[in-house]
Amino acid sequence: MKLGIATPEKVIYTGEVENVNIPTFAGNIGVLSHHTALISIVKAGEIIIKEEKGNRVFKNEQGVIEIHNNKACILLRNCVEIL
């Protein structure tokens, strides 16, 4: 699945992922390839991306996610990778 994460200032992440775990007000959403179409509000927390090489973790502020045609786009107020 293709994933993009961006803030108003810059693109934070783009790439192919196995899955992504996103915090929402309805609870955490796990997104796998070919997930059904979805638009949701993202709450502040941690986004966990599973890549072929391992996991990456990002601390995020509030935003939105759109999933459509095996692509996920996350737009956030702010986001930084936790090393």
Image (cartoon, helix red, strand yellow):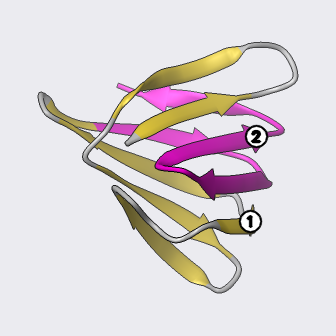
Tell me the quarter of the picture where residue 33 sits: bottom left
Task: Please report the residue visible at 25 percent of the width from the left and 46 percent of the height from the top.
Answer: 18
Q: Residues within 10 Å of mark 2 (few under 14, many from 20)?
A: many
Q: Nearer the viewer, residue 2 or 24?
A: 2
Q: Residue at x 66, y 68 (%)?
A: 38
Measured as percent of width and height from the top left, residue 57 is found at 39, 40
The residue most toward the bottom is: 26
Q: Is residue 80 left or right of residue 33?
A: right
* Magenta highlight on residue 69: yes
The three-letter amino acid code for the residue at tag 2 is: Leu
In the rendered image, which residue does mark 1 sit on?
39
* Residue in the image at 78% along x and 27% along y: 7
Q: Quadrant of residue 52?
A: top left
The label shown at residue 54 is none
Q: Residue 21, position in %: x, y?
A: 42, 60
Query: What's drawn in magenta, residue-wise?
Result: 56-83
Q: Nearer the viewer, residue 70 or 56?
A: 70
SS of the residue under disc 1: strand
Q: Amino acid at mark 1?
A: Ile
Instruction: Decide whether the magenta segment is chiefly helix, strand or loop.
Output: strand
Name which quarter of the figure residue 78 lies in: top right
| Residue 28 drawn at (x, y percent) | 50, 75
Using residue 70 as the reference point, say whether residue 53 is left or right of it: left
Mark 2 or mark 1, earlier in chain: 1
Position of residue 68 measured from the top left corner of the image (x, y, whole percent): 61, 54
**Gap in angstroms between the C-alphas marked 2 and 1:** 11 Å
Q: Find numbered disc 2 in the image and state the secondary structure of the residue it sits on.
A: strand
Q: Which residue is mark 2?
A: 75
